[in-house]
Amino acid sequence: MIEKHLRRRAVEEITGLSRSSIYAMMARGEFPKPVHLTAKAVAWPESAISKWLNSRRSAA
C-alpha cells in the first residue's frame, strides 16, 4: 500500500499548529521532518503525523 503524504496546510489543519510552530518544533526535534517531493515541494508522511499525534495524546 502506498503511503499518503500531507502538504503543510493539511498538517496545519490536522494538528492545529501554525506554520511557524511546525517549523520551530521541527528545529527543536519535536515534530517530524517532511520529505521532499520535488526540489521545492515537501510533504509529511501521514503515518509520521499520526504517530506524533498519538504520542501527544498519550503524554497528556
Image (tube, rainbow, N blue to C red):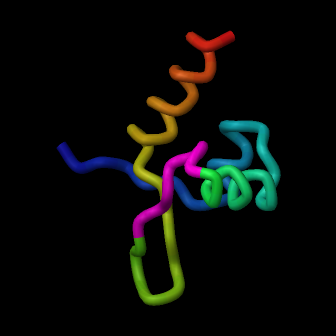
Residue 37 lies, in percent from the top left, at 40, 75
Residue 36 lies, in percent from the top left, at 41, 74
Q: How many marks?
A: 0
At 56% from the left and 50% from the top, the residue drawn is: 29
45 in the magenta segment: no
Looking at the image, residue 8 sits to the left or right of residue 46; the answer is: right
Residue at the extreme bottom = 39
Query: Closer to the camera, 12 or 28?
Result: 28
Residue 31 lies, in percent from the top left, at 58, 46
At 51% from the left and 39% from the top, the residue drawn is: 49
Report the quarter where the N terminus lies: top left
Looking at the image, residue 40 sits to the left or right of residue 13; the answer is: left
Residue at the extreme left = 1
**Magenta span dominant secondary structure:** loop
Query: Closer to the camera, 23 or 42?
Result: 23
Give the residues in magenta: 29-35
Looking at the image, residue 19 sits to the left or right of residue 45; the answer is: right
Q: Is residue 7 above or below residue 51?
A: below
At 50% from the left and 71% from the top, the residue drawn is: 42
At 81% from the left and 52% from the top, the residue drawn is: 18
Q: Is residue 2 above or below residue 60?
A: below
Residue 4 lies, in percent from the top left, at 37, 49
- Which corner quadrant of the image does residue 5 belong to? bottom left
Q: Is residue 46 above or below residue 6?
A: above
- Which corner quadrant of the image does residue 26 belong to? bottom right
Report the quarter where the C terminus lies: top right
Query: Closer to the camera, 56 or 16?
Result: 56
